[in-house]
Image: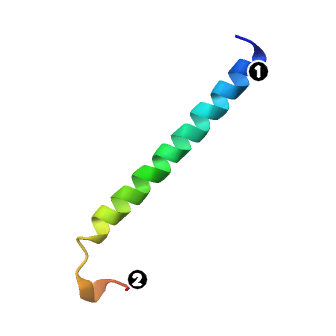
Amino acid sequence: MTHLGFVLSSWIVGLGGLGAYTLWVLVRGRRLSGHVPPERRRWS
């Protein structure tokens, strides 16, 4: 594997991990927001 291959694979792994974490946080937040009673919701 060339140096370019290592660089590109590192970027792909890094951005893929960041994207997966972002998706996990959004899904978890939406799931947890359903447990908050309507009178305690600040966003609605």
**Mark number displayed over residue 43:** 2
Q: Position of residue 13 (x, y in %)?
A: 58, 32
Residue position for label 1: 4
Give the residue at x 52% y 39%: 17
Mark 1, other Cα within 10 Å: few <14 / some 14–19 / many ≥20:
few
Give the residue at x 25% y 70%: 34
Task: Give left or right: position of 3 versus 22.
Answer: right
Residues at marks 2 and 1, CA–CA distance in whole angstroms: 46 Å
Q: Is residue 28 above or below residue 1?
A: below
First reached walking from the N terminus: tag 2 or tag 1:
1
View extreme (bottom): residue: 39
Task: Give left or right: position of 26 versus 40.
Answer: right
Give the residue at x 42% y 55%: 25
Determine the secondary structure under disc 2: loop
Q: Which image quadrant: the N terminus?
A: top right
Which picture quadrant has residue 37? bottom left
Q: Position of residue 40 (x, y in %)?
A: 29, 85
